[in-house]
Amino acid sequence: RIRQPLSAIRSAIRSKTLCGLMGGLSAALMFFRFPLPFMPPFMDFDFSGLVEIIGGFTMGPFAALAIITLKIILKILWQGSSSAWTGELQNFMLSCAYVLPAVFIYSTRKTKLRAVIGMSAGTVICAVTAVFTNLYIIIPFYTSFMGIGMDDILSMCRAVNPLLSTELSLALLGIIPFNLIKNGVLSVLAFAVYKKISRHIKQFVSCQGGQSQPSRQPAAVRIKNSDEGISFASRKTLS
């Protein structure tokens, strides 16, 4: 009766600790971001989403949300913001748009097919979400805050790709392809490494630490009649 609550407490502490570690790793991976050729210059590719999707698949949507939130907080503390916080807000929204649908779909039935369906759905949802958040929330707020116009944003985009000359072309040839490529790559990597990594994560959270615990079964007690009287003999059940 005492061991079960203690085990649950240890497991909860380990889960929170692991969320913190994965949030820190995800934030560290944002240091190694880079632009993609012919894509809008304000969009960077990084591998932080790989940590988030693996954490979500292993520990659930709330853990994934905690990892994403901690990543953004640490990124701001370590690097600050060069986009008036719009980049961090966009990163948070798009990370949730990709990771959470995938985790919810996978959690209904944890199979490889469900993982593929979940990550595919998350990739599409994220790409569509990116169009609306960029064109109607992030870019308008950024241009208003910085005192520039949409033409200035399009001018930067045309410098790397002449086809990105209008808002429609920016959405169809820039925002959507970028997010499909980014999350498609992350999905392939997650599918390739998840099973190997998740085994160690689950062992850590369940307090096993990779060590098998010996089974303890109560000894079977039998009564033995003899000429000397009644005696008790015990034998242990083999596991």
Image (cartoon, rainbow, N blue to C red):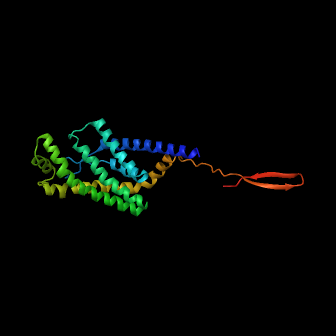
Vertical comparison of 184 with 3: above or below: below
Question: Residue at the spot x=47%, y=44% of the render?
Answer: 12
Q: How many marks?
A: 0
Question: Residue at the spot x=79%, y=55% of the render?
Answer: 223
Taking the view exactly as shown, the residue that stands out farthest to the right is: 227
> In the depicted view, which residue is nearer to us: 21 or 135?
135
Question: Residue at the spot x=28%, y=59% of the render?
Answer: 124
Q: Is residue 104 visible?
A: yes
Vertical comparison of 112 with 204: above or below: below
Residue 114 position within the rendered picture, expressed as x and y whole percent measured from the top left: 39, 62
Residue 81 position within the rendered picture, expressed as x and y whole percent measured from the top left: 24, 38
Taking the view exactly as shown, the residue that stands out farthest to the bottom is: 113
Residue 103 position within the rendered picture, expressed as x and y whole percent measured from the top left: 37, 55
Q: Is residue 40 visible?
A: no
With 210 as the anchor, is 238 left or right in this view? Answer: right
With 55 as the anchor, is 37 left or right in this view? Answer: left
> In the depicted view, which residue is nearer to us: 170 or 121?
121
Quadrant into which the C terminus falls: bottom right
Residue 15 position within the rendered picture, expressed as x and y whole percent measured from the top left: 45, 45
